[in-house]
Image: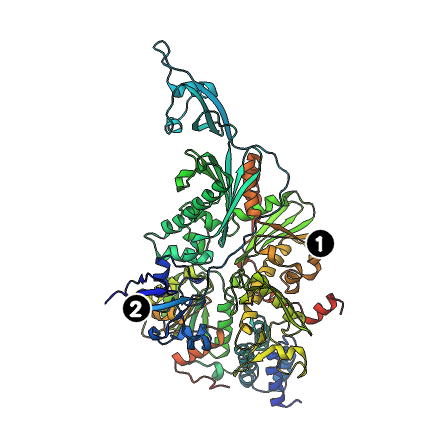
Amino acid sequence: MAVPFITVNQGRKPLACKPGSTLLDALVENGVVVDNPCNGKGTCGKCRVRVRSDTLTPATETEKRLVPRKELDSGVRLACQLVPTEDMSVELMQGERGHTVLTEGILPDFTHKVDIEKKTVTIEKPTLENQEPLADQIARQLGLDALSVVAVAHVLLQPGRYTAVMHEGQLIAVEPGDTTEALYGVAIDIGTTTVVCELVDMRSGDILADASQINAQKIYGLDVLTRITYELEHPENGRENLQKAIVDSLNEMIGSACAEAGVARSSVYEVTVGANCTMMHMLLGVDATPIGKAPFAPVFARAQDIPADAIGLDVAAGARLYCLPHVSAYIGADIVAGAYVCQLQHETGNVLFIDIGTNGEIVLANDGRLICCSCAAGPALEGMNISAGMRASEGAIEEIRVSEDGISCTVIGDGEPAGLCGSGILAVMRELLSTGIVRKNGAFAKIGAFPEDDYRTQLITVDEAGKRAFMLDGSPDRLLVTQGDVRQVQLAKGAILSGFMALLEKAGIAMKDLDKAIVAGQFGAHLSADSITGTGILPAELESRIEYAGNTSKTGAYMALMSSDAKRGMERLADEMDYVELNTTENYERLFSDCLIFPSHVDAEKRSGK
Amino acid sequence: MADKEELIGKLSTCVVEMEDEEVVDVANEYIGDGYPAYDGIMEGLVDGMNKASDLYDAEEYFVTDVLLCSDAMYNGLDVLRPHLDNADAGGNQKKVVIGVVEGDTHDIGKNLVKIMLETAGFDVRDLGRDVPLDDFVTTAKEIDADIIALSTLMTTTMAGMGTVVQKLKEAGIRESTKVIVGGSPISQKFANEIGADGYSANAVGAVKLAQELVGIEPDAER
């Protein structure tokens, strides 16, 4: 069979497609970015491409299920379903739009005491009378009994002044001249979705530059489990590919931050990383597959302090890499960092810490005693598996108000709405509930529930099968919120709330005893308090006691970089946090089921004082 | 004394309306009046659960509603079942082995399917969650199951479903046992790939699928 060639976006250079492989595989292999949250399983329907009519093939059953009829007719297909047999020409549906990654956050007081130290030494010209080896001269001046010659192998030692770089009392490198003024580190948060790097002057603590990227591993799946599945399905090179993707992009980001600040990357001596347990395994090239299956035992959980070149980080020779500690497979270093940054162990009273994402992680601090759990919220709150869902990029509706006067949307980039991002989904859900368009059991109001001339009647469309949907832009053919979408949000909400309730029960605390709730994470920071309580993810009582902590994982990495006390503190905290496995919690199913109930229309009216 | 049809109607309504306490009173009254338990179960409780299934299918009811309906149904069953004649016990019920495959502990979806299969008259053996793959095969052999129903929420454990199909072949019972699969990462495409007999996106569809596979006319009992 001849090799089919694929022309993408009318580009000049068609891509070769291995016979028998899917269009998605061909695009990914050639480095073309296509959204594919389910990694080609044919369940998410996001890898849509438009195929030029003369090369169009009939739609598969899966495509008929996941792609609206109108789109199918206009040549839209799923890349994961298409197996090109002849040359074809396709257009990508998702332009890679600009994105902003949140980098601010809170920072508690801490002792500035870094683990990297620089001292100057002088090498004397040896004489026939004094043949003391050069390395021994350095060791003597540093007060060391011995040193590894590896640490000096990369410089040509001649008589003169040098700077010794020490890590926890060991020599790790020698630089010519006096470079004690230049000591840099990089603090990194590796999120499943986004990666953030900060270049830090370790002497002052100043952040000199930062860089962020979408996690380069996304071509292997958007969420943690899909990437683990990729690793499972590619035993020969999966682990290597995942590691290479993230290490390459870290090197790129470190390079751009260094360039921006005018700092040589060879003067970066420590890199610290906060991440979830899976991302950390993949960064270190360690088998992550046990995390993906019960009983969910990771290969490692403790903090790692290793040479940075062990994973191929392109920084100073001899530099260190410190990875923050985890509690368990699903309470990772990102959450330990969050708990530490928010100083939960020192809080009096009852504080709830919550990081909302595909997995929702929850920590409950009860007078300094910490218990935590993780719940599978699914990707709905991040805009996936929602019919009009999209990433938080240009065109995404991030806030919406529905009233008698109509619909008013806030759209990222102020252009035409193209879909709903996570905060938009939650906002629209809140509005559907408060207007009574969706009832508290999650079902759309019955047909005829509102008078014919009521504004709500105008916003609901009913299809041939009698299924109702909410029209975001007044047209039944464009952006819709379907009953299925509501159910996805409901599942996510139920999962998070049930985790929270399970912890309260475990600690013997009632809702009214809660002093505050801290919402962490880049995603959570975009969710308004009234959306969070209006959809019942957190109870309404808490609305005025919700605080936002920002990217606490990155802040934790920053603190680890700047303070060995913080490193030890986080290691202790990880040991002390008690993990609660929800799935083995008695009656969890009932709790989950109860937590699926939305706040009712009546509650919402009471709250807003109508 | 209340009319039989009226009480049966009430039993059905109690299930649909999730009245898990009232259903017990109605069932007691029904038995107290000397009406046959079998009719109360089939035309009352099961009918109500079927209506709940229809509402679920129409996206009116969700997980919570179905679980609450099933509470009412099971409470009613507890009252009526001891009064069943032996002749009513069935005997030629089709048998299903159900479970969440090894490596996954999420079982709410599986439990919904189980409730609906039981309502539809299947004899269901529930192996629970994180079930070793061999257990599906040995249990199917042991009880001479007609169907094995496999569920998972996690993409990482999907491959286990294919392994079960293989193991059934090795055990020589693949021909006599139908395999149906479900769970959020599962698709028709995946079911085809592993050689399963069917896939359903939801619990109601799973029952219809099971009925088709064992040659029961769907809705025959309604």
| Outermost residue toward the right in this view | A609
Q: Mark on residue A62?
A: none
Tags 1 and 2 on a common chain: yes
Looking at the image, residue A360 lies above or below residue B68: above
Name the element at disc 1: helix
- Which picture quadrant has residue A314? top left
Residue A309 image position (x, y, % from top left): 40, 38
| Outermost residue toward the front in this view | A12
Separation of marks 1 and 2 at Cα, in angstroms: 65 Å
The residue that disc 2 covers is: A87
Closer to the camera in the image, B6 or B35: B6
Residue B71 image position (x, y, % from top left): 59, 73
Looking at the image, residue A166 lies above or below residue A380: above
Q: Which part of the image, by quadrant, shows the C terminus of chain A? A: bottom right
Name the element at disc 2: loop
Looking at the image, residue A559 lies above or below residue A490: above
Asked whether the viewer can see residue B24, the reply is yes
Colour scheme in use: rainbow
Label 2: how many Cα within 10 Å (few below 14, some 14–19, many 20+): some
